[in-house]
Structures are given as C-alpha cells and as structure tokens.
Image: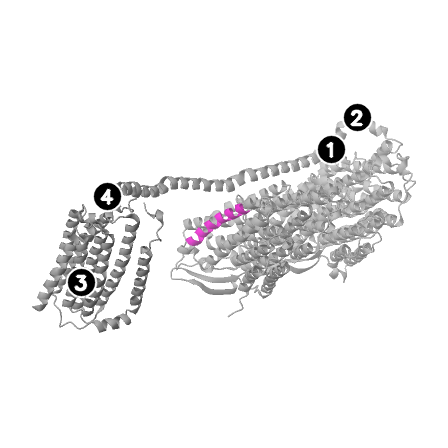
Amino acid sequence: MMEQIAFYSMAGLAVVSALAVVTLRNTVHCALFLGLSLAGVAGIFGVLGADFLFASQILIYVGGIAVLMIFAVMLMGRASDLTLRQVNQEWLAALLVCAITAAGLLRGAKAYLGSVAAGAPAPSTKPLGRLMLGDYVLPFELISLVLTAALLGAIFFTRKETLPSGGGK
Amino acid sequence: MMIENVWLVPLLPLAASLVILFGGREREDSPMPFVGIAAMAASLYISLAVIFDAATGAAALPFEKEWLWYSFAANLGGQPSIFEMRAGVLIDGAAAVMLGVVCLVSLLVQIYSLGYMHGDRKFKRYFAYISFFTASMLGLVVSNNLIVVFACWELVGVSSYLLIGFWFEKEAPPYAAKKAFITTKLGDLGFFLALLLIFTYAGSYNLVRLKETVEMGYLPPMVLTLIGLGLLCGAAGKSAQAPLFIWLPDAMEGPTPVSALIHAATMVAAGIYLVARCYFFFLASPIAMETVAWAGLITAFLAGSMALVPYDIKRVLAFSTVSQLGFMMCALGVGGYTAGLFHLTTHAFFKALLFLGAGSVIHAVHTNDMRSMGGLSKRMPWTFLTMTVGCLALAGIPPFAGFFSKDQILEKVFEHSPVMFAVLVFTACLTAFYTFRMLFLTFWGDGRDHHRVDHAEESGAVMTVPLMILAALSLVSGWALEHGHAFASFVGSGGAAGHAAEAAGHAAAAGHAINPMVLAAGVTAGACFFIALAYSLYAGRDFSRAQRLKSLFQPVFDLLEKRYGFDAFFLGLVDLADRIAVLCRWVDIEVIDKVFVDGWGLLCRVAAEISHLFDALFVDQAVDGCGYVSRDIAGRGLRSLIARGQVQEYMLYLAVGVSLFAILK
Amino acid sequence: MEFPLLSLITFIPLAGALAVLCLPKDSRRAIEAAALAASAVSFALSVWLYFAFDRSTAAMQFVERHAWIAADAVKVDYYLGVDGLSAPLVILTTLMSLIALIASLGIKERFKEYCFWFLILEVGMLGVFESLDFFLFYVFWEITLVPMYFLIGIWGGPQKEYAAIKFFLYTLAGSVFMLLGILALYFKADPHTFDMLALMKIHGTLSFRFQVLAFLAFYFGFAIKVPAFPFHTWLPLAHVEAPTAISVILAAVLLKMGVYGILRVNYCMLPLGFEWFLPILVLIAVINIVYGALCAMAQNDMKKMVAYSSINHMGYCLLAIAGVSATGFSGAAFQMINHGIITGALFLLVGVVYDRAHTRDIGAFGGLAAKVPVFAGLMSLSCFASLGLPGMAGFISEFLCFLGAFPRWKIYTAVSVLGVIITAAFFLRMIEKVFLGPLNKRWADLPDMNTRELVSVVPLAILMVALGIWPKWALDMMNTTMVSLAGLFK
Amino acid sequence: MTLAHYIALGAVLFVIGIFGALTRRSVIGILMSIELMFNAANINLAAFNRYLHPEGVAGQAFALFIMTVAAAEVVVGLALVLAIYRNWDKTYMENINLLKG
C-alpha cells in the first residue's frame, strides 16, 4: 500500500512537472519544474529500492543539472521572452506523433502487467561499487575521460575570445 | 694392310688444313704449305698402296668399315625407334681410282702452287683452303654413307666458294664465288630431295644396304626415277651440266691452280662420281638413265660449241671441261660405267695439265687474253711442249690418253643410239678445233703484244715439273689402262655396279655394234681435219680469216658469246626472286603487320571505343542519373518542400520513424 | 630429400638479382661479379644436369614436387622436372644467358637495373622449361614478359618504346588465350588439376570440339612466341630495337618457348585438335620457311635479316612437328638448340659491327674481310652454319626436320626445301657485300674484335662445329623422349 | 506494483520529452526535454533491473553511466548554447537554420 502511494505520488509529481516543463511560457519556471520532475524521478528510484541511484539523481540532476539550467536561462534570458510564444507551429503534428508513440509504447508495457518484484530490494551501493571497479572498470574510466573532455569542451566553447569574429552569418 | 687405314686419307689433309689455318703467322716464306704437301703425300701413299693391294688381289674389294656416328629417333616401319646413323668408308674400284687421282692431282697442284702463289699475302691461307678442299673431296670419295657424301659434297662446294673468291679484294671473284655456290646449291636441292626419298622408302643411307634394297626391288619404279632425277640434279650442279653450267666459266676468277684442281680435275668430277656411286638407282630406272644420257649429250654439245668463241684462255678450258663432263655423263647414261670413269680419270690428268700450263702462261704474261699472246713457244718451251701433249690428249689423237677413253664412250653411245653418236662425234671434232685454236693462238706465230710476250719467261722447276709429270701421265695412262682391259676389270672389281652396268650395256648392244677400228680411224681423221682448220684460221700472224668467218655467221657467234642465254635466264631468275623478296617485304610491313598487329590493335581500340561509348552513354549516365535523382529530384525538390534547415523538423521526421517502430513492434 | 638441382638452377639467378639489387649503383665491378657469378653457377649446375641426365628413360627426371597453394578449391604444386625435350633447352638457356651477360658487359648506363632485369628474365625462361604444373608454367611464362619489356624499352634503339610495347602487348594477347586454354583444361579434368603430366592422360575424355577450341587457344599463345606466320611481325622490330644481348636471348631462348609449348601442350594434351590442325600447321610452316627467307633476302639491315632468318628457321621446327614422327620431333628439338646457338652468335656478331660502325646497313660496308679477318671469319662461319652447311650444327637438325616431315607431306617439304637455297642466297649476298670486294675507305680504321666479344662468340662457334661433327652429344639426350613422344598416340 | 507501471511511467515521460524537444522554440527548452527523455530511460533501466534481474545491479550501473553522459551532454550543450547566444544573439531554433542547403 505504502509502495503504491509512494509510486503514484512520485509518478504524478514527475509527469505533471514534466508537462509543465514542456508547456510553460516562462523559461525560468520551466527550469524550476524540471528540477521538480527530476526529483520525482528520484522518488521513483527510491520506490524501486535503488538507493545509490536515488542519491546520485538528487546530487547530479536536481543539484547539478537543474541548477545549471536555471543559471543558463538567467544568463541569456530576455524580457521579451515572457511575452513570446514558447511553442512552435508544428506542435499539433508533434502532438499527433507523440500520441501515436505513447500508444505504441503503452501497448508494449501491457505485456509486463503480470510481472511483480521478487522479494525486498537489496541495497545496491556496495555491489555497484564492486561492479564499477571490477568488471566495468574500463567503461568507468572511459566515462571519466568523457567527462574530462566535456569539461574541456565547455571551457573551450565559453571562452570569449576563441570564436573568430567572422564565424557567424 | 693399308686398306684398313684408308679412313686416314681424308683426315690427314683435314688435320693439315687446321694446322695451317691456325698455326703460325702469315709470312711469305711460311713453312706451313709443306705441312699440307706432306699430308697430301702421305694420303697419296696410302691411296696408291690401296690400289696396289687391290690390283694384286691382296685386298678384297669392296672394302667396308664403319663406326657409329650418331643416333636419332626415327619412325621406321611406322614404329618409332632409335635409328643408328653409321658412317665409314666403302672402297670399291671406282673409289680407289678416284682416291689415287685426287691425291695425285692435289699433290701436284700444291707443289705447283708453291711457285704460282709465291708472294701472295694470303699464301698460308691458300694452302689451308686447298688442304680443306682435298679433305672434303676425299671424304666424298671414300664415304659409305650418303649423308656423309652429301656433307662432303657441300663442304667441297664451300671450299670451292672460298677458293674462287680467294682474291676477294677484287670485284669479280666474290661475285663468281657466290654464283658458283648458289648455282650448285640449286642442284643440291635435287640431291637433298633424293636423300629424303631414299630414307623414306629405303630406311638407310648405307650404300651397300641401299644397293641390296634396290636390287631386291623393294622400291617402286616411280620413286626410283625421282631419286635418280634428284641425284642427277645434284650431279648437274656440281659437274656443271646443262643448264647449271653457268657457274663454271665464272669460276675461273680463282687462282689458276685452283681451277686446275677443283674446276677441272676433281670437284667437277664429283657429280660424275656420284652418279657412278649410286649407279644402282639409275640402273633400276630406265627413264633416269635416259635423262642422264641426254643431259650429258646436250651439255657436251652446248659447251663444246661455246668453247669456240672466247679469247680468255681459261674460259676455253672451262667450257671444254663442261663439254668433257657431258661426255662422261652421257657415257654413264648409256650404260658405259667403265667408259665414263675411264674418261674421268684420263680427263683429270690432261685437263689438270692444260690448266696448269695455262696458269704457267698467265703467270708469265699476266693476262688471260689470248689476243695478247702468241709466239710463246720459243719463250716457254717446256710449257709449250707439255701443253701440246695435253691438247693432243684432249683432242683424242692416238696414242694419247683422251683417245682411248673417248673412243670407249663413243662405242658405247653408238650401241645405244646412232643419233646421239652423231652429235657426240661432231662434238669431239669441235673439241679438237677449239683445243688447237687455243694452242695456236697462244704459242704459234709471233707475239701480238710485244710488251707482254717479250717479257715472258719460262716458269721455274717447281711449276714445270708437275707439268711434266702430268704430261707423262696424259701420254701413257690411256694406253696403259686400256691395255688388257686393266681399268675395266679393276673398276669392275669394285662391286656389282660395274658388272651390272656392263651387262646392261651389252644387252643394249645386241642391236647394233660398231667396229672399233673403223670408229677410231674415223674419229681421228675428223679430229685431224678440224685441227688443220684451226691451223688455217688461227696459226698466222693475225686471224683475219677467222674474223671474216665470224662476220659471216654473226648471229651464231652472238648466240655463242651469250652462252645461249642461259646466264641471262638465271640472272632473270635471281632478279625475279629479288622482286618477289621485295614484294614479300612490302607485304610483311604493309599487309601482315598492318592486319595482324595494327589490325589487332585497331580491333582492340574499336572495342575500347565502343565500350567507352557504352560507358559514357549508359553506365556513366546511370551514375549521373542517380546523382541527378538524389540531388535535383529527391534533394532539391524534396528539400524545398520540407527541409528548411529546421532541426526540429528533422527531429519530427525522426520521431515519426520512432513512432512507427513503437506501433509496429 | 633429393638434391634440388632444378630449383637451384632456376633460383640462383634470382638470388643474384637480389644481390645485385642490394649493391650500390656505383660499384660496377661488384655488380658485374655478382651477376656473372649467379649466371655462371647456374650454367655450371646445368652442365652437371647434362652429365647426370639419365639418357635411357623418357620419364621426367630431377622431379621436385611440393604443395604450393593448397586451398580447397585450387591445388597448385611447385612441380619441376625435365625430360629429353626440356633438359637440352634448360642447358641452352643457362649457356646463352651467361654468354649474353658477358656480351652485355659493355652496357654503359643503368647497368645495375639491367643486370637485375636480365637475371629475372633468366629465372622466368628456366622456369617455363622446367615447370610441370600449368599454374607455375603460366607464372614463369608471364615473368619473362616484364623484364623483356624493360630491357627493350630502356636499353633499346631509337624506336625502343614502340618495339617494347608492341612486343609486350602482342605476346600478352597470346598468353591471355593460353590462360583460357589452361583454365579450360583445368576445369575439364576430373579431379581438377594443373598437373601437366596428369593432363596429358585425359585426352581420351575430351571431345573433339573441346580439343579444337583448346588447341586454338594454346596455339595462338604459342604461335605468337614462335613466331608463326602471320603473327611474326613483332619479331623483326623487337630484334632490331633490342640491345644485342637481348636480341640474343630473344632469338636463342624466347622463341623456343613457343615451339616447346606446341610440342608439350598442343601435341601431348590435345591430339585430336592437333590432328585437325595439321594441314594448316604445315602450310604455316612452309610459309614461315619460304616467306621468311624471302623477306630476309629483301632486308638491308643486317639485324633485320637475321631476325627474318629466325622466322625461317623456326619454320623448320614447325614443319618437323607437323610431320608427327620421331624423326621430326628430334629434328625440331635439335633445331631449337642449334638455332639458339647459331642465331645467338649471329646477333652477337651483328652487335659487334654495330658497336663499331653504328650502322647495320649491308650496303654501307664492303671489303671488311681484309680489315677485320677474325670478325669476318666468325661471321662467315656463323652464316654458313645458319644456312645449313654440313659439318655444322644446323645441317643435321635441318635435315632431320625435313626427314621427319617428308613421309607425311611430300609436296610441302619439297617446296620448303626452296627455303634452304634462299637462305643461302641472302647470307652469301650479305657476306659478299659486307666482307668481300674492295675495301670501303670509310672503314679503313675499323678495329677487330676485342677479348670480351671473342669470349662471348668463340664458345658458340666451337659448339656449332662440335655439334655438327658429333651430334651424338645432343641427340642422345633426346632420343628416348622423342621415341616415346612419337609413340604417344599410336 | 507491476513492471508495467514503471514502463508506462517511463513511456509517458519519454513522450513528454519528445513533445518538448519537438515543440520548444528555445534551445534550453529542448535541452531540458532531452533530460526528461534520459530520465525516462533511467526509470526503465532501474525497473528492469529490479523486476527482471534482481540478482545484479547492471541496470543501475547503466543508469549511472547515462547520468554521467547526460551531465556531460548538458555541460557541453549549454556551453554551445551560450556560445551561439553570444556570437549570433540567437536563442530560438527557427532562427538557426545552418542545415539548410
């Protein structure tokens, strides 16, 4: 019972916030709702018993990415944005496509209606640690490399004097 | 037993020639000629010993000895197997006589040449060639294998080529040498084909075995006739029979001793000898026999008539040689085996004598032209004397050698056919005429060219002694050999060939015969009459009467001087061959090359053009078409509809795709 | 394992070529030494082959067989062996290579590359005669082409590029057809095989149609090499433009590959096709003989004349083969050897005079015999040998050729005997114009042959005479094989 | 709760992400939508791990990897957006049409 309450509340939070993200006109609000939606997903992780994921979701997404978004929005926000429409002309077509996709995906999900969890979830931090530094050590290291590269790329792109003046047209 | 060593006879001069050619340097007083002379003397010794043994019955003739030469794969009797080619010596009476004659004349000529060629800058080489020639000739004589005979036959031709062209720095000798070689080679084609036929049908080249095969009648008559004609063809080339005699007068460009040895006494007799050696083929084919007789007859007459006109002393002798060879050939053709060989022997002596005498004269006056001579009898008595003997022998005056042998021939011919006999007798009379015309022009009267004649001197002993020896032989050989049919029985002992020939002759003789005494008297009288005629025409200071006669019969003289047009005919043949050759070259460059190389290339290029065209029209257009479709239709057209550079549009299409996946699963 | 004599003979020149490649360009003496040593060792080994050769058997000898490409689909063996047909040719090849190499010591420019290509060429030629596997045969056959192309194209005369490309394309066109033939035989054989000895045994299973087609394919390849009329026109050009030593190799060895192929492949593997083609073959042979000789007679260029005389002489080989008899085969095999020696010598001698006078025009000379007696003597000797003078090598073989063809083709043989006299005519005319008569003042200070030239020509001259007097030395090697060859289809 | 619920939740979030990515005019909006899609995927991974393979934690490990990649993507993406904004003064997607040929 508790699980269901938790699931539905968290799922509702995530879905509603997500809808807000994609529909609201004010981008700052969007970013704030994104944080909320991500927190809802973190709750879902909690319901699933994935404790380490829960923690990292909070830390990385809610604490990192969402905040980064907010900063970015603030950096290049304009007053005119609030009055302008934030959705383009193809929204109807997009809606149609999305509806079809959703229908397809949900039909796929129906197959797992009878699948229930076996037993209580076990804490996963320790096995994850073993896995990362054991079998998956190579992807793990590669990920660190990717992160470094991303860091360097970010710095490179945001340096003011780097882009040549004639680059745009 | 000397006959066991008879194989040495050709090998000694061969070794000598190699020694002379490669040993020592070319010097005026080179000792090398003596090597050749020594080898020749040794060969002569062996030959004489063989003859002596055979004559006394110490050695049985025919004598055969052979060794394995080489073996080759052959289809004999339709079954491939290894055929052993054996080579060796076969001595019968004829071969023994020829050995003696060749060795003797060669020895004398070599000694004579010591004087004649003295001072020549190729002194040593000359003797090497002479020795080589003698070796080849002796090889031809002794060999029991027709292939070896043919090989020596050709080698004889080559040495003749080398010796005719000995003074190659001049213009004429190389040409004459080439002419001689090619003409005899033309005849050799027949010989060659005969050899092919012989092996194909008889499967051997051994003369003894061939004789057995032929006499057993294993060969079809047609083949025998062809073989006979082929051999005759070869013999006609080498022995200068009509129509292949054209080379012999030109061959006189060589040194005179060479003319004496090769073109009078020995090599030209090789053709006669070949016919004699292969007589069994001819006996088996009447057509071949008849052809031989007629070829000889025609040659004898044509050459005899042509000898009437030249003023070159050596040419007269050359035509006379051809004529005499015709006599021998004719004799063989009518079955006079011994008569032909007898004449061959005596002719070798007196013709060598005449040539060497002529050489002596030429040596003294430095010209061949008899119009510049005359009155030499006083200046060169020994030469004159010996040459007179030679002339008498050639004219057939008793008791000189020519009389006996010619008499025998005429006898045989009369038995065969009176028409041929008449022609031959007339030719014999002509012989007497031109012989003495030459003698009178050279030695009688006064010197017409005082500058030359007054400085003429008798040659040295090294030249005159051989002349005397030959003169003695010319004087006695006929009588001595005729005496008691010595020659006939000796040559006959050489094998069944002689007997068979005599038998054939006697069979023919059943119809008509002639009293030998009547014949001898008649022919001698005729000869004497023509000698007198020659005297009246040519013995005086000038020969105005001869000139008048000539103007009277101008066309005849022209014809004779042009040698009946044979030269022109063969030159035309050569010219024709040249034209064909040029045509061939043109065809090769312009047609064959164009068609098969350039044409091939053209074909490839046309194919290439076509495939290029196809490529450009279809393949490339297809590629371009793909590009066009994707760029202009799919690209530009589609893009102008939906692609406006909007990322979200693209994403929409992507999402459509995703949705399709989602619903279709 | 037996001593791999054939492999050594074949690949020592290759080792030499690699050694030459490694040497610096400037050390000419070392290059000369390496090339000569390789060639000489190969020749010495082939002399050993001559003495070790068993003359009493017709089977292949000195056989070496190793799997080379052993895929499931294709089986190719490294399969070498010689019999009485190929062993003399192997010896001839090594001999002529050595002599040609000596003759080419006078080459001035790009000597290193020259030696390299030359030795590669030798490898190819030897391989063709030795290989008993069709694949290997084809590989070696093609190996000979490339070096030849460069040797003519780089070191040749004024028209060298044209001659080289003509030679290359023309012979390549031929070998393409040959490849077709090889593949046809390969797929017709059951099980599929490239083994030439095995392919000789399957002719009973081949239909007439197939044999004719395969015969034509092979014949086209070989006839160009022979060269048989009308595919001969590349030869005079290639000969004239090639450097002396290469002309020697071309005439002495390369042409033999064609005749060898016709005997080994066309006759042994496709008897029905051969029988069908015989009337045409004999006609071609006669044309080669008479027409080649006539063409030679009309030439003014000595080298061209000799080249056309080669066409004439190869005609004798074809005529002999057309005779389909043991005698004919012996004649053809022996004629190949003799023609190699004699024509090789002739080309060397023409090269000698060209090096000095820079012209080969027959009419430009005259009276040289007085000036250069040694040269004149050797040249005349070679000419006489070439025109088939008895006592020299050419006579015996020509005679055997005619003798072999005569029983089957009487008229044709009689006509081709005409070729002999035409040959005599043009050689004698050449001798007369070049050596005899008054000395042309232009050549008053022409030097006689030097040591290098003598070393290259004199052995050939000795061989010419030796083989003419004592042909047993060569014929004994061939006899057994020829008997078995002639008895193949009885 | 069954696996289907979680998958349905993931699907809904994912579709919302798609919708956002397709319709938002601002670049940052698109980035945020993409983050939503990542999260949907993560939910699926965690759920599959929990329901189908509870004995291991591979699903969670993948989710972690995705998180890091997402983080990197966001960092680089925002940096790019900033760069575009600074240089061209554009934040709306319809104004950025470099892909138009």
Q: Are discs 3 and 1 both within one chain?
A: no
* Subunit ID for the residue under disc 4: B
Q: Is residue B542 left or right of residue C439?
A: right
Residue C320 forms part of the magenta stretch: no
Q: Which mark is first along the chain, 1 or 4?
A: 1
Residue B552, disc: 2
Q: Magenta region: which residues? A: C164-184
Name the secondary structure under disc 4: helix
Q: CA distance from mark 4 to mark 3?
A: 34 Å
Q: Which quadrant of the figure has residue B639? A: top left
Query: Where is mark 3, residue-wise?
Result: D44
**Closer to the observer: label 4 or label 1?**
4
Nearer the observer, disc 2 or disc 3?
3
Residue at disc 2, secondary structure: helix
Name which of mark 1 and mark 2 comes first in the sequence: 2
**Picture disc at residue B642:** 4
The quadrant the N terminus of chain B occupies is bottom right
Asked whether the beta carbons under mark 1 and mark 2 sit within 8 Å of each other, the answer is no
Query: Looking at the picture, do discs 2 and 3 lie on one chain?
Result: no
Same-chain status of marks 1 and 2: yes
Residue B169 is at least partly visible in this image? yes
Q: Separation of disc 1 and disc 2 at Cα? A: 17 Å
Q: Is residue C165 magenta?
A: yes
Chain of the residue displaying label 1: B
The image shows residue B453 at horizontal and vertical percentages of 89, 38
Q: In this rendering, which labeled residue sits more in front, label 1 or label 2?
A: 1
With B264 as the anchor, is C11 left or right in this view?
left
Amino acid on which disc 2 is placed:
Leu
How far is disc 4 from disc 2 in space, using C-alphas? 123 Å
Amino acid carrying label 4: it is Ile
